[in-house]
Image (tube, helix red, strand yellow):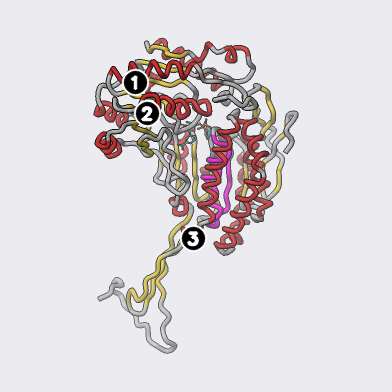
């Protein structure tokens, strides 16, 4: 893929790059320089329907390929991802602004989903019972759904799409990815790798677009399941609309993730752990720590003194500089939103421990940089406490007891991730038992499960019952058919009964 000049991007339909017909384009930026690097076509409903038709036509043949052969294609794809790692990293960094180390981590975690999907033969095994009644054997088997769609956010250009789609492909579906219009280049690049891996045309589609493309996917009868990852208001809309049109939907939303710090914790270690988990990727992670919650005033005072120094020492800059801790936020609008959040915090009466507006790069660069910001004395009811802030503006919320921490966290409408730092086994057990959050850490700053465990938040961080990553993907992307069969001896009489079938 070309990496200089402004490219005009395409869709990927029927195994080909297909030019957009709508005449509508979105700008794709390099957030580090603020320059437009590509124009992404925004599909019409009609173009989306055509893509769905291609996928629908390709599905039956892929369904009929043996699961072992499908797994082989996944293995080829995995090998291609690692062979093309450098190109992938270059594209991800350029369109997202994240550091190379961070992008590597994302690719590695994305490959975990492919690894799990290579094990699909094991995950789609059915159940069999002999002689359930009158020479009848019964079995339950998993079948693919047909055409399924994934709608992705900008903040993980490869990890989230791989988590949403690898298993869907492996278990025999035709998959349509509506990539984020902010980072479409990674999705188009992996389309080429799918083709090289031997995936039949039409089984992997990338439709670029916005609301029009999404609404067509939500309403079209042939699309059987929707996997969405993005912000909570859109997740809710996707879930409600998808359900209205009879689809299976899992829609993951935003997070407001807390780190509870008990008085017995090693505060140096706590602060180190908080830095990366709170500010890494310019805090644009759904599992980023938004809030640190020291228990007791003494813990808070000691912690604030350590954090103040560490936050001030963070290096914000380009992914091309080796010592950069984090890069820009994704867009000029995202930077504006951060500046507005800091102003809002000031108006709400927080104490600003570190002010991200003061870094020279924030005012001098054309890139979308914003420095690390830390608020103290943040309280429930404040906007900066209640809302997800998707950028490097983080909170300290002081509490007196562990019970108070648990209560506050449980009352918040988001419940994606949470962690406790302590050496006290009782406190840890109480916390993991009582906390109403989907992914919980104990002395682990970002408790993202490995790819073979299920991933999803609680409350308004997830709508629908499915999980991302993990074996639940094999369930979500298949339907279970239960067959009862009897093969009577030639000439024997089956008889007829009008009573409901029973084993009496
Ligand atoms: P977003 O909700 O703005 O967009 C996500 C996708 O939805 C994009 O493909 C976008 O084109 C589409 N979309 C946006 N508005 C739409 C609308 N009105 N109708 C139909 N489709 C629409 O999210 P984003 O800004 O790309 O990503 C950041 C958000 O994603 C954050 O809130 C973050 O917490 C969340 N996120 C959650 C997880 C998780 O696992 N829970 C993981 C990553 C990101």
Q: Residues within 10 Å of mark 2 (few under 14, many from 20)?
A: many
Residue located 53% across and 35% down the image = 153
Return the residue nearer the eye: 468 or 281: 281
Question: What span is in magenta?
Answer: 156-178
In the foreground, 467 or 394? 394
Q: Which residue is mark 2?
A: 258
Question: Residue visible at 46% across and 33% down?
Answer: 286
Mark 3 touches mark 2? (CB < 8 Å):
no
Q: Residue at coordinates 33% horizontally, 73% vertically from top-left?
A: 132
| Residue at the image position 54 percent from the left and 18 percent from the top | 370
Kindly report which numbered mark, 3 or 2, lies closer to the viewer in this rendering. Answer: 2
Image spot of residue 106 (x, y percent): 55, 38
Q: Is residue 132 magenta?
A: no
Name the residue carrying label 3.
143
- Residue marked by disc 1: 397
In x, y percent, where is residue 206?
A: 62, 43
């Amino acid at each position: 893929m070309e990496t200089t000049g402004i490219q005009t991007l395409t869709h990927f339909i029927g195994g080909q790059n297909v030019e957009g017909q709508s005449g509508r384009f979105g700008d794709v930026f390099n957030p580090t320089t603020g320059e437009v690097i590509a124009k992404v076509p925004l599909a019409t409903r009609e173009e989306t329907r055509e893509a769905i038709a291609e996928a629908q036509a390709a599905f039956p043949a892929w369904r009929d390929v043996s699961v072992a052969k499908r797994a082989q294609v996944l293995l080829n794809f995995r090998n291609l991802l690692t062979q093309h790692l450098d190109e992938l990293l270059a594209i991800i960094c350029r369109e997202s602004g994240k550091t190379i180390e961070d992008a590597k981590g994302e690719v590695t975690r994305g490959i975990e989903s492919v690894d799990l999907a290579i094990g699909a033969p094991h995950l789609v095994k059915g159940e069999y019972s002999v002689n359930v009644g009158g020479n009848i054997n019964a079995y339950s088997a998993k079948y693919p759904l047909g055409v399924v769609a994934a709608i992705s956010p900008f903040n993980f250009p490869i990890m989230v799409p791989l988590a949403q789609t690898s298993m869907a492909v492996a278990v025999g579906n035709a998959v349509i990815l509506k990539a984020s219009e902010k980072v479409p280049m990674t999705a188009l690049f992996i389309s080429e790798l799918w083709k090289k891996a031997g995936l039949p045309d039409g089984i992997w589609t990338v439709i670029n677009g916005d609301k029009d493309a999404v609404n067509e996917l939500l309403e079209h009868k042939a699309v059987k399941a929707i996997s969405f990852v993005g912000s909570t208001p859109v997740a809710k809309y996707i879930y409600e609309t998808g359900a209205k049109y009879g689809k299976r939907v899992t829609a993951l939303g935003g997070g407001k993730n807390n780190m509870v710090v008990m008085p017995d914790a090693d505060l140096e270690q706590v602060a180190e752990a908080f830095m990366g988990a709170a500010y890494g990727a310019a805090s644009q992670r759904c599992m980023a720590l938004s809030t640190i919650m020291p228990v007791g005033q003494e813990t808070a005072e000691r912690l604030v003194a350590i954090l103040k120094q560490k936050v001030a020492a963070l290096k914000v800059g380009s992914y091309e500089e080796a010592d950069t801790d984090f890069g820009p936020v994704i867009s000029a609008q995202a930077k504006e939103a951060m500046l507005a959040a800091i102003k809002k915090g000031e108006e709400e009466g927080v104490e600003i421990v570190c002010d991200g507006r003061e870094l020279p790069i924030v005012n001098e660069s054309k890139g979308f940089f914003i420095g690390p910001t830390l608020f103290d004395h943040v309280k429930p009811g404040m906007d900066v406490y209640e809302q997800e802030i998707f950028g490097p503006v983080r909170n300290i919320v002081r509490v007196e007891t562990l019970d108070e921490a648990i209560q506050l966290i449980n009352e918040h409408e988001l419940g994606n991730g949470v962690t406790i730092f302590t050496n006290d086994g009782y406190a840890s057990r109480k916390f993991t038992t009582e906390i109403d959050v989907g992914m919980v850490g104990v002395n682990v700053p970002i408790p993202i499960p490995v790819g073979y465990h299920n991933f999803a938040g609680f409350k308004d961080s997830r709508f629908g019952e499915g999980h991302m990553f993990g074996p639940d993907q094999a369930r979500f992307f298949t339907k279970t058919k239960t067959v009862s069969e009897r093969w009577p001896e030639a000439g024997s009489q089956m008889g007829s009964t009008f009573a409901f079938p029973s084993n009496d």
